Amino acid sequence: MATYTNLGIKKIAQGDEAGTWGTSTNTNLDIIDESLHYNSFNFSLDADKTLTVTDGVTGSSGSPSGREQVLEFKDTGTVLSTTRSVIIQPSVLTKMWLFKNSTAQTLRFKMSSGDSGILVASGKDALLYSDGTGVMKQSESASPGVTTVTGTSGQTTASPTSGDVVVGLDNGVMRKVAGGNASTGTTTNNFYASTNYSTYNFQGSLQIGTSSAENISIQPINTSGATGVGSFYVSGYQVDISDSFSSFTGDMAIIGNGLNTVWTLPMSNVGSNNQIDVWWNINLYRDASYQSGNGYPYYGDGKLISRSGLNDNYSKIVNFTMGAANSGSWSTFGGFKFTTTSNVTSGHYIIKANTY
């Protein structure tokens, strides 16, 4: 006498179906194939739906058997008015499914009428399984039970009803936290992030319309764009690399060697088109093991490159450093205020950060 497996595959008994076993074998192969494939069901009534896995019987396109690997549920006629249940039978079935809810309502997937089931929100999908105990269960690594994956611990926060899967980057990964265009027609631009981080990379550029050489000042500001963050020790040097450059010895100079609240950095000469282009790249790191009284100071370095507009008459590179003093409110640090003597005509900036 034939018996059936968990998925309804027929096991032909010894000596049975002589001359006809090919039909049963073909059906078995169809069942195996079906269990690895996709199918869908479109609700035509505002009611729960039961799918019963029947021994030796396969489904068809749009009429799933319940054993398919991927099952999508649709509501093209918008007949559903509330949460509906999809019940998979028999309740002792052991299997894993990927359910996709393409309806406008939440769907509850369950193994029996007494099963509380797993809710899957509209537009979401979920990897669910049954272990034969009559209860639908979720894989918390790939289902609506995951709402957040944090970068430090890799733990999950379970919320089995609904919600997007949000993946947070590891704390040690640099990512963009702010950016945009500079304000034009003004001498002041505040470039900052609204959250304090431990590690920063600031990059950007400004185009300045001017008829004479001038300096640019770079001052720490907080996460609201206000000055008064704190003092820092600064040192550095400049190198003239314009067409009049003669030697490194004659064109290097120490700048701002001492305690300051702002870098004042020289830019290149103007050239024939009354314009200075300037780029910067500044890296700052918080040392959490030293001087904790004011939110831990920052240490780092930067580079400022400037040229005389669209011609190559003059160019200058300024390398500068920073070691923040244990004063002020470095726990509120968010970025920098860039101030020029003449108005900015264009510019852009980007801030990358992490909390490592």
Image: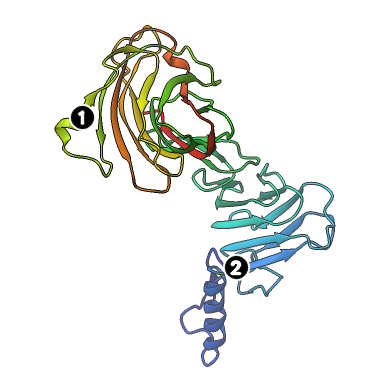
The relative height of residue 293 versus residue 226 in the rendered view (above or below) is above
Q: In the shown orientation, is residue 188 left or right of residue 63?
A: left
Residue 148, how many percent across, how many down?
53, 37
Secondary structure, mark 1, is: strand
Q: In the shown orientation, is residue 126 left or right of residue 306?
A: right
Secondary structure, mark 2, is: strand
Q: Which residue is mark 2?
A: 38
Earlier in the chain: of badge 2 and badge 1, it is 2
Instruction: Give me the residue at 42% from left, 44% from top.
Output: 272
Q: Is residue 93 visible?
A: no
Which residue is farthest bottom?
19
Q: Nearer the viewer, residue 118 or 258?
A: 258
Instruction: Give me the residue at 57% from left, 86% from top.
Output: 23
Q: Quadrant of the C terminus?
A: top left
Q: Is residue 91 visible?
A: yes
Q: Which residue is mark 1?
A: 252
